[in-house]
């Protein structure tokens, strides 16, 4: 695992965007794995700027997002589909048909998850996966547990995550209690992974990533099993 420690959030976002841009320049039909949450927003802003300046094109880029609440309509302004459109897709030259977010209204959510894994496989797997991390070490909606799912699956949200995410909703009872999420196994199939970690709230989770133990109680430590992971963090998250 490689660690890049940046001065601040801004520098971290630029570093992450530069890695994604280099990937797209090298392979125009790159398959990107994307994440929601506040952390990657700065990176998405950088990518939008680069696209506007003509430095990179998303014309042939294909994207798969990590997760989506369930049930939720894609039009709901708290859905991850809405978030991705607002924070990235609507501002770049991507073909919307090439953007994939799990369907929060799927009649058969298990089947939706199965088809999602199959579609990623048919696309040749993810070239570059972008990840954030929860304070409790979750990645996507893979929460601390004694066992972790390999494939994309339906899951319940922990109280910790419901409370953390309630800041985006009018009240805590409006946060959906379930989600569809890529599993740890699906995430580890990506060729390269970058994980963005910002702020002192994430210090404990980052400390475990710097450690020696893979621990399902901190799902992000499963990334130690992958051959090409870069942690990009700011000093606030890094400093002991
Ligand atoms: P955040 O969320 O980027 O908003 O901190 C990350 C996560 O919970 O995975």
Image (tube, rainbow, N blue to C red):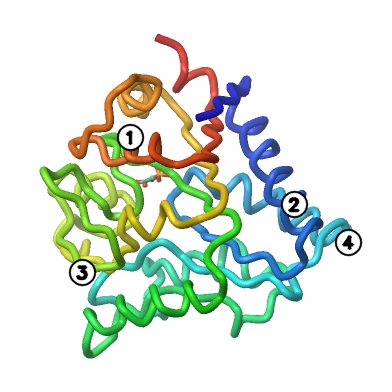
Mark pair 2, 1: CA separation: 26 Å
In the rendering, at what x and y percent does residue 225 appear? Answer: 39, 39
Q: Residues within 10 Å of mark 1 (few under 14, many from 20)?
A: many
Name which quarter of the figure residue 115 lies in.
bottom left
Q: Nearer the viewer, residue 18 or 90?
A: 18
Location of ligand 1 given as a quarter of the image: top left
Closer to us: 171 or 133 = 133
Query: Counting residues from the N terminus, which is met first, the one under dot 4 or under dot 1?
Result: 4
Mark 4 vs mark 1: give the one in front. Answer: 1
* Among numbered discs 2 and 4, the one appearing first in the sequence: 2
* Marks 3 and 1, how far apart at CA: 21 Å
Q: Secondary structure at mark 3?
A: strand
Q: Quadrant of the image for the C terminus? A: top left
How far is disc 4 from disc 3 in space, using C-alphas? 39 Å
* Dot placed on the residue nearer the N-terminal end, 3 or 2: 2
Residue under pointer 2: 21
What's the mark number on residue 54? 4
- The answer to whether 157 is drawn above or below residue 77 in the figure is above
Query: In the image, residue 22 lies at what x, y percent?
Result: 77, 49
Horizontal side of residue 153 vs 202, given as left or right: left
Residue that mark 1 sits on:
221
Q: From the viewer's perspective, is the residue at label 2 or at label 4 nearer?
A: 2
| Residue at the spot 64% in from the left edge and 33% down from the top edge | 10
Task: Verify CB contact (< 8 Å) between mark 2 and mark 1.
Answer: no
- Under circle 2, the secondary element is helix
Residue where numbered disc 3 is placed? 154
Residue name at image x 41 percent, y 70 percent:
77
First along the sequence among labels 2 and 1: 2
Q: Earlier in the sequence, mark 4 or mark 3?
A: 4
Tell me what residue is drawn at x 56 percent, y 71 percent. Answer: 124
Say whether marks 2 and 4 touch (CB < 8 Å): no
Crowding near the residue tagged with mark 3, few <14, some 14–19, many ≥20 C-alpha atoms within 10 Å: many
């Amino acid at each position: 695992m490689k660690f890049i420690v940046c001065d601040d959030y801004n520098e971290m976002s630029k570093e992450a965007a530069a890695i994604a841009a280099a990937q797209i320049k090298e392979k125009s039909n790159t398959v990107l794995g994307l994440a929601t949450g506040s952390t990657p927003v700065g990176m998405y802003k950088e990518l939008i700027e680069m696209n506007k300046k003509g430095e990179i094109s998303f014309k042939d880029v294909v994207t798969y997002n990590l997760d989506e609440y369930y049930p939720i309509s894609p039009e709901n302004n708290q859905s991850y589909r809405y978030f991705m459109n607002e924070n990235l897709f609507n501002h770049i030259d991507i073909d919307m048909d090439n953007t994939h977010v799990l369907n929060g209204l799927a009649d058969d959510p298990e089947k939706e998850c199965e088809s999602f894994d199959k579609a990623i496989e048919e696309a040749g797997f993810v070239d570059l996966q972008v990840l954030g991390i929860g304070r409790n070490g979750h990645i996507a909606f893979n929460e601390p547990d004694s066992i972790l799912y390999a494939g994309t699956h339906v899951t319940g949200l922990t109280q910790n995550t419901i409370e953390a995410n309630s800041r985006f909703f009018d009240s805590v009872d409006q946060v959906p209690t379930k989600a569809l999420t890529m599993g740890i196994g699906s995430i580890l199939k990506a060729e390269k992974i970058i994980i963005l970690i910002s702020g002192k709230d994430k210090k404990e989770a980052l400390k475990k990533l710097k450690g020696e133990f893979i621990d399902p109680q901190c799902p992000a430590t499963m990334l130690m099993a992958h051959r090409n992971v870069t942690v990009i963090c700011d000093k606030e998250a890094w400093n002991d």
